[in-house]
Image (cartoon, rainbow, N blue to C red):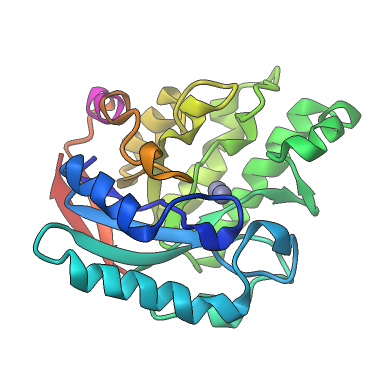
Amino acid sequence: MLVDLHNHTPLCNHAEGTISEYVEQAIKAKTLFFGFSDHAPMDFDPKYRMKFSDMKKYENDVHNAREKYKEKITILLGYEVDYLKGHMDERVLNADVDYLIGSVHFLEGWGFDNPEFIGKWEEQDIDEIWQKYFDTIEEMAKSKIFDIVGHFDLIKVFKFMPKGDINLMAKKALIAIKNADMALELNVAGYRKKVEESYPSSSLLQQAFDLGIPITFGSDAHTPNQVNMFEKEITKLAKDVGYTECVYFVQRKKKFISL
Ligand SMILES: [Zn+2]
Ligand SMILES: [Zn+2]
């Protein structure tokens, strides 16, 4: 991937490898802009993220890697932040970073993508869950807090598919993303999950393209060997849909680069 902005570090407690190992893998892959966006600290679900007291270390470690590898690759600094009302913290939202990825991993406190809580899928109407998810993404876009939408249709992770038309369910969210001037991330983690396809799906990506929403890319790597996995598939998908460029962010400003 020329641009790969979604990558984790062991500070989140569920990733492995050193920052250098991730970067060296990206250099091997000929990535030009490689970003870390580890799970930002939050006073909810603290087990799966860094602590507030780790922020300095995280930012310093990424800055040091930027300096160390500057001849070979451009390293960018970000956070993946949960859009969860009442739990978004100013220390994260005002951090001096290149970009913030906004992700929805919780619906009313339910970690719907966590295998630990998969049982809850049986207790509710699947179509209602999906609609609630996209309504939350719409709300996130309207908040205008973030630069990038993380894994746009993560709700499909366990392949509990709705009866209704997904394109219709997601439409208002996509329009809000366009109006907020955000970028949509093409995230390959879905290929590693039960659903076995990218986030977003090709038909949702087509809708995004028709609306003129810019894209970026993310390995969503939690181990160094996941960096740049499924690069061929994801680049082909972007081009097939019609994209000829993608974006990265420096100091919260969008920059375009040809695919
Ligand atoms: Zn993670
Ligand atoms: Zn995520």
Residue situated in front as seen by the camera: 92 or 245: 92
Residue ranking furthest to the top: 163
User: Could you say which quadrant of the image residue 2 lies in?
Assistant: top left
Figure quadrant of the N terminus: top left
Res. 134 in view: yes
| Number of marks in the rendered image | 0
Q: Could you say where residue 78 lies in the image, as x and y percent from the top left? A: 40, 65
Q: Quadrant location of residue 236?
A: top left
Q: Position of residue 218 (x, y in %)?
A: 37, 44
Position of 135 relative to 232 (above/below): below
> In the image, is residue 133 above or below residue 55?
above
Q: Residue furthest right?
A: 123
Q: Residue at x 58, y 51 (%)?
A: 138
Q: Where's residue 162, x and y in %? A: 69, 21
In the rendered image, residue 168, in percent from the top left (x then y), is placed at 57, 29
Q: Going 66% across and 26% down the picture, which residue do you hit?
A: 158
Q: Which quarter of the rendered picture does the C terminus lie within?
A: top left
Q: Nearer the viewer, residue 82 or 169?
A: 82
Q: Is residue 33 above or below residue 115?
A: below
Residue at horizontal 71 percent and vertical 59 percent from the top: 47
Q: Nearer the viewer, residue 141 or 77?
A: 77
Point 73% across, 40% down: residue:
112
Q: Is most of the magenta stretch helix, strand or loop?
A: helix
Q: Using residue 73 as the reference point, say whether residue 206 is left or right of it.
A: right
Along the viewing direction, whichever of 229 and 234 lies nearer the viewer: 229
Based on the picture, tell me whether residue 164 belongs to the magenta stretch. no
Instruction: Write down the region rendered in magenta.
Output: 234-240
Q: Is residue 251 visible?
A: no
